[in-house]
Image (spheres, rainbow, N blue to C red):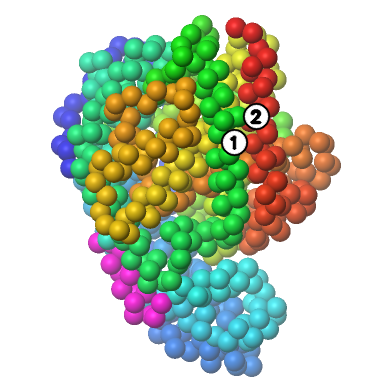
Amino acid sequence: MPSRSPQITFAPEARSAAAELGALPEWRLSDLYPSMDSPEFAADLAHMDAESKAFMGKYKGKLAEIAGGPDGAQALHEAIRAYEVIEDRMGRIISYAGLIYSTDTTNPAHGKFYGDAQEKVTNASSDLLFFTLEMNLVEDALIDRLMGTAPLDHYKPWLIDLRRDKPFQLEDRIEQLFHEKSTTGRSAWNRLFDETMASLRFEVDGETLTLEPTLTRLQDADGERRKSAAQAIAKTLGENARLFTLITNTLAKDKEISDRWRGFEDVADSRHLANRVEREVVDAMVAAVEAAHPRLSHRYYALKAKWFGKDKLEFWDRNAPLPKVPQRTIPWAEARDCVLDAYRGFSPKMADIAKRFFDEDWIDAPTRPGKAPGAFAHPTVPSAHPYVLVNYLGKPRDVMTLAHELGHGVHQVLAGPNGALMAPTPLTLAETASVFGEMLTFRKLLAETKDQAARKALLAGKVEDMINTVVRQIAFYSFERRVHTERRNGELTTEKLNEIWMDVQTSSLGPSINLSPGYETFWAYIPHFIHSPFYVYAYSFGDCLVNSLYGVYQSADPKFVENYFALLAAGGTKHHSELLAPFGLDARDPAFWQIGLKVIDGMITELEGMEG
């Protein structure tokens, strides 16, 4: 791992920009625990361990007998409820440790705290592994009968989902081995990636920057500053490519071993199962997006190159603001009001939930050395509340990111009453509220923008965001598929990874983007490849779905708001087909994807009609 730079320098303009942002909030993690060394945290660790062992002693080897007893439904309900309580406590512990770690991943004390918590949670959860495995050994006919009976019917969605995993579960001791070795396997490699990425430093025009502000420079109005940032990223990633290649190869092989033992046929089947989505649905989406490259990304970037007076854009110009459009720093307070007003225009209830994140210190916004890059909304556990992390730098895209993550947060708050087992939403629907929140914010800004140049810039920015969400994420998915498929034949060299990356990027971005030397290693900083293989297609799924939902909303469906909140509140209790049916939508229909893609197509057409 490269050594951490001893000092970060900030240019005068950086300090000035920070002042323009205003006071940025930092989250209050004491809602989970007072501190890392608090008696409350230590007590929960002890309770978790004791409860897990007691639960195993009470139920292991007895579930079939309990289910077949005279009060089977009541007894199984009690068992699942006890299991859920322990899961909630475990989730609280690991959520707190993970959030602490994300505030400064280069802090050794934070790293140790997170690592120790992971190990203790893994050890305790090993005592619970038997439960879901043994539940799936109870006769199907008996479970079918019992889960239609109160009070067990409350957990029917969870039981149905659990049984979908049945064909892929292994013998108890093998499952326990996989589980316990995760701390020295996948989790350890994930941590190595995070700490390495957080420790990287990028020399940009005399400044020493971390990844997040360096990536933000790619959106700078000054082309030379964009170029310098791109070259700095290329240089640092190139110098560390050997390590990122090793991490990628190791995790791809780790996944292949797990998939082979479990009997998954396709490299992405385990993700599809977790997402509760059929492979053919994802394949249809991918085919539709790839077929649309010429009329979406290729067409848009040719138009943008024309605006810049070039035949081709350099890759560092892809997300550049339009020329001759004034740029300004958007203060935090303005960003907050913009998002909340947009949410309120849709529903006061939605705005009220989002407002709690600001009022109750559930957001961490400043960019700091060592802080996790990017943004996320962490649901923690239903007995607590979600937290949002952003790296706010006052760009228009930062406002959209805030709207996006708050959408996640609203979704997580609404799904929370389903409890620890059924609140989590499959990724096929997890992006629904976030992308919808972005769309609401964008539409509000667009409606209020009267200046033609500013309107054009806003519309172009939205098109770029949608291309990044739909086209680019499917390209990421295609990259992952090729990497994981080829890894089955042996290790991939850095050169091979670079070759696959450049191939899928060339195909998706088109002939108007010049992928000059240096871009070939940009695959290395994408965290989703490491943390959540094949996660990325969920963004495309969510964007196309939201475009379709927004069309229903614009048609003034009187039940839309009611149905929308019902969708979010369902959490993980319903399949996507059941949740979309009230809107007249069906993701299993290949034509469904064309609805969302036509929205992007229409925006590009609108841009083509604007002069200048």
At a point 60% along the width and 7% down the height, the residue shown is: 612
What residue is drawn where x is 44% and y is 23%? 513
Residue at figure coordinates x 64%, y 36% from the top left: 597
Q: Please name the residue that numbered disc 2 is placed on.
A: 601
Q: Quadrant of residue 11?
A: top left
Q: Nearer the viewer, residue 370 or 458?
A: 458
User: Is residue 274 a member of the stretch shown in magenta?
Assistant: no
In terms of depth relative to the viewer, which is nearer, 172 or 389?
172
In what element is the residue under mark 1? Answer: loop
Q: Which segment did they paint magenta?
A: 170-184
Q: How many marks?
A: 2
Residue 548 x/y as whole percent = 70, 41
Q: Do residues under tags 2 and 1 come within 8 Å of each other at their CB atoms?
A: yes
Q: Residue at the spot x=50%, y=50% of the render? A: 379
Of badges 2 and 1, nearer the viewer stands 1
Q: Main secondary structure of the magenta part?
A: helix
Residue 292's disc is 1
The image quadrant of residue 593 is: top right
- In the rendered structure, find residue 184 and report the number of the disc placed on it: none
Classify 10 Å Cα crowding around label 1: few (below 14), some (14-19), many (20 and above).
Answer: some
Q: Quadrant of residue 8?
A: top left
Q: Is residue 449 above or below residue 108?
A: above
Instruction: Provide residue 320's location: percent of width, then percent of height.
Output: 45, 18
Residue 102: x and y in percent read 35, 43
**3D distance between C-alphas at marks 2 and 1:** 9 Å
The quadrant of the picture occupied by the N terminus is top left
The percent position of residue 259, horizontal first and vertical second, equals 40, 66
What residue type is disc 1 on? Ala
From the viewer's perspective, tell me whether residue 226 is left or right of residue 246. Answer: right
Secondary structure at badge 2 equals helix
Which mark sits nearer the N-terminus, 2 or 1?
A: 1
